[in-house]
Image (cartoon, rainbow, N blue to C red):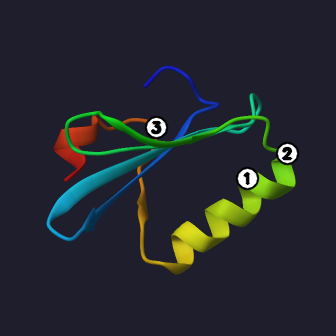
Amino acid sequence: MSNKNVKIWIWLYNGRILKAICHPKDGIFAIYDEHDNLLIKRTGLTLVQIKKIEVVLTASGVKRMDGHREPFTYL
């Protein structure tokens, strides 16, 4: 991953792999399923709102990927 402004989280939900991608500087938060189908997308978020989402994700046990791993080798 070359873009350091992007944060990615991955978790398992009801036997499905879900992925959340966050662009804090652009105010975009999106959730995709294992087939990269867009499930939820929010735009125009402030940095405070994005931080609140990040806190909820980490409190729920969602794993955040570091910037040096490919998504499917992480799992």
Dot 3 or dot 1: first in sequence order is 1
In contact (CB < 8 Å): disc 1 and disc 2: yes
The residue to which callout 1 is attached is: 50
Q: Which mark is residue 18?
A: none
In the rendering, at what x and y percent does residue 29 appear?
A: 60, 42
Q: Quadrant of residue 14?
A: bottom left
Residue found at the very far left of the displayed protein: 15
Q: Quick one: 6 or 27, which is closer to the camera? A: 27
Q: Look at 41% across and 49% down and name the residue there.
A: 65
Q: Nearer the viewer, mark 2 or mark 3?
A: 2
Q: Look at 42% across and 76% down and name the residue there.
A: 61
In the rendering, at what x and y percent does residue 10 appear?
A: 35, 55
Query: Callout 3: helix, strand or loop?
Result: loop
Dot 2 or dot 3: first in sequence order is 2
**Crowd band around label 2 with a 10 angstrom C-alpha radius: few (<14), some (14–19), many (20+):** few
Residue found at the very far top of the displayed protein: 2
49 relative to 36 in the view: left or right: right
Dot 2 amino acid type: Thr
Dot 3 amino acid type: Gly
The residue to which callout 2 is attached is: 46
73 relative to 68 in the view: left or right: left
Q: Quick one: 22 or 35, which is closer to the camera? A: 35
Q: Which mark is residue 67?
A: 3
Q: CA distance from mark 1 to mark 2?
A: 6 Å
In the rendering, at what x and y percent does residue 51 appear?
A: 74, 59
Residue found at the very far front of the displayed protein: 39
50 relative to 33 in the view: left or right: right
